[in-house]
Amino acid sequence: VLEKFGNFMESLSTHQGLEVEQALHRETEKVLQATVGNYLNLFEQSLEAIFVYERLGNNVLKFNQAFLDVFRYESQEHARGNTVMAPKFQKDGRTTEEHLIEHYQYLDAEKKPLRFEFLLERSNGEVFDCQITLILNLSNSNEVIVMVEDLSEKKKKDNIIQNQLQELNKKNEELQRYINSNLQLENFAYIASHDLQAPLRTIVSFSDLLKRRLTGKIGKDEEYLDFISKSGQRMSHLIKDLLSYSRVNTEPLKLDIINIPNLLELIQLELFSLIHEKKATLILDDLPNLIKGDKVKLHQLFQNLISNALKFSKKGVPPILKISGQEAAFSWHFSLEDNGIGIQNEYKEKIFLLFRRLHAQHEYEGTGIGLALCKKIVEQHKGVLTMESTEGTGSTFSFSIAKDL
């Protein structure tokens, strides 16, 4: 009985062992199938071209959809039986064959993946840049898994960016040369105009002295002395304006809190004779009380714009100038609206250029520097100076002064 019982237990144990082994085998197959499925899905869905390459046979054994896209094959049937092509020479001047021999030697020796940039050919003959990753099949050394990332679009974008950078560098160099040239010109203008003042004063003084001494003695020739004196005075004004322009560019802002109504009241006192002569009316409307800026330069700015409005008035029509201001989030905005002669629309940008005059000297006096000076002052205050005008009706000059000076 004991013997029979022992045989029974042994057969039962063997039966249970087989069941356990079979269950483990089934689970292993499931895990293996799931793993293979994941890898196949990764292989098919990858955005990079992946293919298995037979080294000796020079054949593509298996490939994914991205391989067809990258190498421009119309279908799987079109791709089968074709090999991957490359130009004879790579970018470094070495042959493609020399590169491949070196890469394969590394794979055989190191048994590690290798990544490098390469030139390959599409099925239509187009050569393109790519990044290749080679992985040796450890179970079959004749097979290599190849991953290809198409870099052609990236290279194009890089070339565009590089060209843009080169163009930008050229423009920066030109701008720097312009700035250096402009600074040299301003220094020259400052030195030249400063040194010209002394001999010019001498010319004007001696011509006036000569005129007083020769009055009534040289007849009509006295008008020649008038020409000398007036020309000297015009040149003196030009030099003073040129000095002012040079100083505006070279001197940094000296910031202060400025009372705008008081500043305009002072300018009106300084221009009292001209205002009285022209019978002009100045209207100060809704102006801010206190702003931050360079008091001397803003004084020049307002004085030049007001003087221009009075100077370029219509004959027989008393000038009316309305000065108003408005606060914005990041700046102060001012406008000066007059009823003067106005200018044609085609000249509204040119009037801010240095020495640009639209009228003859005998019609309206001036040096052609005033508005260029105003533009510089506004730009130094991080603002913009503009002008709107209608010929025969009047002009409006508008400018802004930044708050964060």
Image (cartoon, helix red, strand yellow):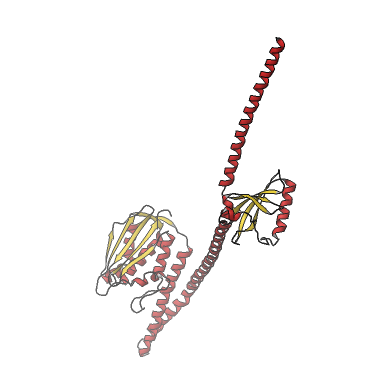
Q: Residue 317: give x, y in percent of width and height.
A: 24, 72
Q: Quadrant of the N terminus?
A: top right
Q: Residue 170: give x, y in percent of width and height.
A: 55, 65
The answer to which of 342 and 80 lies nearer the viewer is 80
Residue at position x 40%, y 65% from top? 374
Tell me where residue 236 sits by quadrant. bottom left
Tell me where residue 315 sits by quadrant. bottom left
The mark total stands at 0
The answer to which of 373 and 255 lies nearer the viewer is 373
The answer to which of 336 and 89 lies nearer the viewer is 89
Q: Residue 13: give x, y in percent of width and height.
A: 67, 19
Q: Residue 11: give x, y in percent of width and height.
A: 68, 19
Residue at position x 30%, y 65% from top? 337
Q: Quadrant of the C terminus?
A: bottom left
Q: Is residue 206 above or below residue 31?
A: below
Q: Is residue 333 above or below residue 359?
A: above
Residue at position x 37%, y 61% from top? 399
Locate residue 107 relative to residue 26 in the image: left or right. Answer: right
